[in-house]
Amino acid sequence: MQNGLLYVLTSLIWGSTWIAITYQLGVVAPEASIVYRFGLAALVLGVYVVVRRLPTRFTAGEHAFIALQGAFLFSFNYILVYLAEQHLNSGLVAVVFSTIIIMNVLLGAVFLGNSIRPRVVAGGVLGVGGLALVFARELAGFELAGGSSLGLGLSFFAVVSASLGNIVAARNQRAGLPIVQTNALGMGYGTLATLVVALARGVPFGFDSSPSYLLSLAYLAVFGSVVAFGSYLTLVGRMGVDRAAYIGVVFPLVALALSTAFEGLLWDMRGAAGVALVAAGNLLVLSRRRAAPASALAGAS
């Protein structure tokens, strides 16, 4: 599938998962829902791997890196986001999380030796600024007191965890590890990591058999995890961890668009200006720099 289609597909799915997650909250503890989500996703991918008879032999060292990817990308960052949203509104968490594009640039340079692309950094700054305008009302009510500072810290470490997961995933692809099998095993490892954290925190493992919980769980597992992460990590391998991460700026706008359509969300001029900035940043990040003409190069020599 072409990069553009993968980009749009991932943005649409992750944007819609915000609505699905609301049906997960209430009866079941968030950590338990994360275990159910990625456990089911690992099972679905595992069945696919077995049916297609895909190779699954990996060395102990490769398993270690797959487990790191699973822990950072499919476990810790989700736990931290859920905990952060107990202290901050989701709009502020979305703005903080959108800084993953900057974090990916920095960590990619440190751990992968990637060059820092100014266009990506500039686009990321535009995107984060635009998203801040979109969520201006939520940001206006923020005070660095009480649990808000804790929520901000948790959001920051969620970004670090997700970014490290991106870096490890890119490293695994460079090492020739296949995406499907790596995701299947990684989600299994991530499920175990979340289970350990939940048990250590004494989280009760209840279950909700209501149709809304079951349908949202299936959507989050199959589309939000299997399909979206498969598409996103394919983009990470093709485009790099910096450019692919701009999806983290785009999908909150998809969520807001769905909220506008189904919940009657009202927009103002700041929100419209924010969307324009995000669009400009998106164009800057995804556009490719054209090579200079040969005559210009000759003239500069």
Image (cartoon, rainbow, N blue to C red):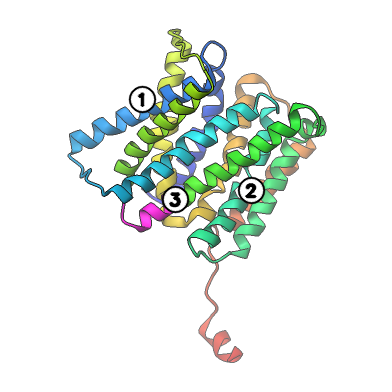
Where residue 167 sits: x, y (%)?
48, 52
The answer to which of 28 and 233 lies nearer the viewer is 28
Q: Is residue 178 visible?
A: no
Segment tinted magenta in the rendering: 169-177
Q: Main secondary structure of the magenta part?
A: helix
Where residue 138 sits: x, y (%)?
76, 30
Q: Which residue is depicted at the point 64% across and 37% down?
A: 155
Q: Nearer the viewer, mark 3 or mark 2?
A: 3
The crowd level at tag 3 (other Cα within 10 Å; few <14, some 14-19, many 20+) is many
SS at mark 1 in the image: helix
The quarter holding residue 187 reads top left
Q: Disc 1 to disc 3, how far (Cα)?
A: 23 Å
The quarter holding residue 38 reads top left
Q: Which residue is depicted at the point 82% across and 32% down?
A: 143
Q: Name the residue under label 3.
A: 168
Reply above or below: 160 against 262.
below
Reply above or below: 92 against 25.
below
- Is residue 34 part of the magenta span, yes or no? no
Q: Name the residue under label 2.
A: 279
Q: Which residue is depicted at the point 63% across and 58% down?
A: 121
Disc 2 residue type? Answer: Ala
Pointer 1 or 3: first along the chain? 1
Where residue 234 sits: x, y (%)?
39, 48
Pointer 3 or 2: first along the chain? 3
Q: Disc 3 to disc 2, how far (Cα)?
A: 28 Å
The quarter holding residue 66 reads top left
SS at mark 3 in the image: helix
Q: Mark on residue 40? A: 1
Q: Disc 1 to disc 2, how far (Cα)?
A: 35 Å
